[in-house]
Image (cartoon, rainbow, N blue to C red):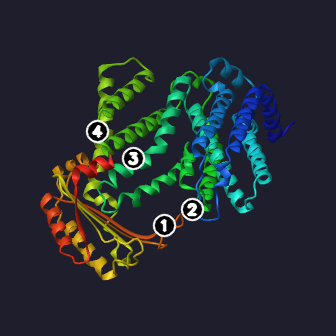
Amino acid sequence: MLSAAKRISRTSNRDLKANSLFFIITNLVLFVNYIVQMSIRNFITYYNESITNYYQGYVIAYIGVAAVALCGVFTVFALFHESYSKSHADLAYSLPAGAKERFFSKLCTLVKLHILPVVFWNIIQFISTIITTDLSLKILSRYAAVLFLTELSTCLFVDLVVILCLVCCGRLAEVIYTAVIITACEAILPRCIVLSSISIFSTRGSDDIEIITDKWFAWSAFPAYLMDNGYSNALVLMLMGSSLLSAALICLLYFIYKKRDGRATGKPFVFTAFREIVLILGIVTVTTYVLSDPDNIVLLPVVLLSYLLIRIFSAKSTLTIAKFVKWIAVFAVYMIMIFAFNFISYLCDGFAGKPDLSVLTDYDDVWVWVQTDEDIMTYTSSYKNPEGRKTLTKEQAEQLTDIYIKALDSREKSFSDYIDCLKNRNLAGNFASITLYTRNSDDIYSDNNSIIDVIDIDVRLTKSSAEQVAEEIKALDFISPEQISYLETKEFYH
C-alpha cells in the first residue's frame, strides 16, 4: 500500500498533466516579463553603491508581477474546482482520497505550475544580468533578490487569498467578490486607520506615522509599490518574511478545508463567520477611508447597499422584514463602534502621546508653520544659507518647542472640535506645526544627503491660540518670519 506522501505525489503528477496548459501560459508570461526587463537597460545601469538606490522600472514591474499573479489565480481556480462546481465535487468526494491527500496534492501541483516557474525565470534573469553588465555582484544580487521576492510574495499572497475564499465559499460569485474585497481592504486598511484615527489627531508629524504603514505593503498583493522607495537589506527581509508567512498560512488552510464536504458546494458561504469577517473588513476599511477624507462621504451609502446585497444573496431562507431590520441594526452597531473608536482616538491624541523632547539637540533646519482659518499663513524658517550648519542650538530648540507644548496643554477637547478636525483634514482650520531636523551632509542637493534626526510636531488649535503661538514665535530673535498668502499655499499643495 502506498504511503500518504507517495499518494499525494502521484495525484499531484496527474493533476500537473491535466493542467499543463496553465504551466505553458505561466512560463510564456514569465518569458515575456524577462525579455521586457532585460530590454530596459536603466533597470540595472542606474544603480550605484550608495544606500539610496532606486528601482527605476517599478511601473513595468507592477504589470509583470500582476500578470504572473493572475496566472496563479486561474491555476488555483482550476485545481480547486470542486469547491464551486457541483459535478466536480461529486466526483472528488466519491474517490477514496482523504481531505489531506486532496489538499496537499493540489498545493504540490500549484508549486509546480506556478511557484517553480517564478523561481526558474528569476534565476535565468540573474544569470543573464551578470553576463550582460559590469556591475558588482553585491548590487546585482540585491536587485535580483528584490525583484524575485516581490514576485514570489505577490504570488503567494494572492494564492493565499484565493484559496481561502475557495475553501470558505461554495459558489463562484462569492469566491470572486470576497477575494477582491479581502485583497483591496487588506492592503489599504492599515493606512486608512492611521490617516483617520492617528495622524489626524496626533501631535506627531504625519510623515513619522504614515511611513510605517508603507511597510505593510510587503505582505499584500502590492509589494511592488515598495520598489519606488529603493531596495535595501531591510526590504529583502520584509519580503522574505511575507513569503514565508503566506506559505505557512496556505498550509494551515488545510484545517479549514477538511471541515467541508461535498454538500458545502453550491452554498454561498460554507462558514458564516467568514462572511461576517469579510463584511466587517469592508465596512471598517471604507468607513475609515471616509473619516480620513470626508469629501468621500458618498461611499457610506454605497457600502451600506453592498452590505445588504451580500446579506440578501447569501441568505439561507426567505427574506423577511424582521431579518432586514436586524441586518440594518447590525450595520448600525458596526458603524457606532468605528466612530466610537475614532472619537476615543481624538480624546487620546491619536494614541501617540506627546513628543519626546528629551532627545532635542542642535539642528540644521527649522520649519515653523502657523495657520489660521483666514487668508493669512505665517511661515517662518531659520534655514537661509544652504551651506549653514547647526543653525538652531539645543537651548533654542527647547525654547521653540516649549511654545508648542504649552499650546497643546491649553487645548480644550469637545465634540465640536472633533467634528472640526474631521472637516478640516487638509489645509484648513487653525493649527501650528514645527519640524526640526539635521542632515548628514552639508550639500542639501546631494543624492547621499538624508535626514538623520527629526522632531515633528503638529498641534490643532483655536484661532486665538494659533495667533498667540504666532506672536510668541515672532518674538524669538533666532526666527525670521515671513508672511505667505494662504490661498497661494493652498493652491500650491493642491
The disc labelled 4 sits on which kind of residue? Answer: Asp
**Mark 1 or mark 4: which is in front?**
1
373 relative position to 145: left or right: left
The amino acid pointed to by label 2 is: Thr
Determine whether label 3 and label 1 are within 8 Å by CB.
no
Among the 4 quarters of the image, the one containing residue 113: top right
Q: Nearer the viewer, residue 403 or 286?
A: 403
Instruction: Determine contact: label 2, label 1, CB under 8 Å.
Output: yes
Residue 432 falls in image quadrant = bottom left
The percent position of residue 350, horizontal first and vertical second, equals 32, 58
In the rendered structure, which amino acid carries the disc numbered 3? Cys
330 w.r.t. 151: above or below: above
Residue for badge 3: 192
Choose the circle earlier in sequence order: 3 or 1: 3
Bin the neighbour count of mark 3 within 10 Å (Cα to Cα): few under 14, some 14-19, many 20 and up. many
Label 2 Cα neighbours within 10 Å, binned few <14 / some 14-19 / many ≥20? some
SS type, badge 2 = loop
The residue type indicated by label 1 comes to: Ser
Q: Which residue is mark 4?
A: 295
Mark positioned earlier in the residue sequence (2 or 1):
2
**x, y percent for residue 319:** 36, 18
As measured in the structure, the alpha-carbon distance from the residue carrying label 2 to the one carrying label 4 is 36 Å
Can the viewer see residue 427 in this picture? no
Which comes before the other along the chain, label 3 or label 4? Answer: 3
Separation of residues labelled 3 and 4 (CA atoms):
14 Å
Residue 153 can be seen in this image: yes
The residue to which callout 2 is attached is 52
